[in-house]
Amino acid sequence: MSVVIGVATPSYATSDIEPGYEIKFNLDLDAFSSTIDMLDIFDAEHDEDLKVYYFDTPDQEFRQLGYIHRLRVYASDKKTNITYKKRFTGVAVEDAIAEATEKGFHNDMPNYKFENDRKERIDVFSISRKEKFTKDDILRFDLIDPEYAIELFQDEAPKKYRRWDDEDWYRETLSNTITYGPALAHTYEGEFLGFEADLEIWSYKGDTVTEISTKTDDPREADQIEAAWFNKLSEEGWLSDSQTSKTGFVMDR
């Protein structure tokens, strides 16, 4: 029997921040006869191969406060990028948006992305900003210089991000970070139940996580996609028992 789920669509009347939605599910790769079979089911074609690193202190002080520093290095000629992300785990979306508004964030900020990361029927509000760099000999697909990467994070940190709590604390903490990863990621573009779908297969320390996701700016469509995908994935036995985030997949090992 299908299980129907629904998420109450929130109202953000007190703020002009209107986040988009990214709906995510982890798949059980062992539920498919092969990776090729899985890709055929989702009509998915290969997009990119990349390595993903995270930077945090040994006790993950940044992550505990919602800061994520991520470096992506591509096998192709695509530009390397670093991402600054602030996640509001365990905080109601309305409260997170109110805090962001108090910090001076608003919709008319094209360099920032406001998003509700929806997983396990829970929306987590996040703010992220990406900086792109031309490939060089210091950040290569097969090897990076961690100290150089940390310098990039230091130099490019946006003012609103580094001053969210305390700038001196932020810079000092960033200088004490280490690398987590890299995870090797293979990405694919496909389709599921009439909606565009991104598939990612991440491998790290002998383990693998496979995620299917899609994005929409329409909260009602987000509810529709989540319910339809959850029901179908459940019926087919394709859902993984573990719905960990990709960040957790790397940083918890």
Image: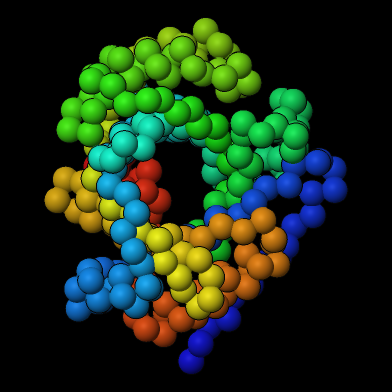
Q: Quadrant of the C terminus?
A: top left
Tell me if residue 168 can be seen: yes
- Quadrant hosting residue 176: top left
Whether residue 44 is situated above or below residue 252 in the rendered picture: below
User: Would you say 174 lies left or right of 99 here?
Assistant: left
User: Disc count in the image?
Assistant: 0
As drawn, the residue found furthest toward the bottom would be 1
Please, is residue 116 above or below residue 16 in the view? below
**Residue 128 coordinates in the image, percent (x, y):** 55, 35
Residue 59 vs 230, above or below: the answer is above
Q: Nearer the viewer, residue 132 or 177?
A: 132
Residue at position x 25%, y 76% in the image: 37
Q: Quadrant of residue 76?
A: top left
In-front residue for pair 86/198: 198
Q: Nearer the viewer, residue 215 or 28?
A: 215
Residue 237 x, y percent position in the rendering: 34, 80
Image coordinates of residue 134 in percent, x first then y, are: 37, 25
| Residue shown at the point (37%, 73%) measured from the top left | 43
Q: Position of residue 80 (x, y in %)?
A: 36, 31
Please give left or right for residue 252 compared with residue 133 in the image. Answer: left
Question: Can residue 69 be seen at all in this image of the molecule?
Answer: no
> Which residue is found at the position 70% from the left and 32% from the top?
109
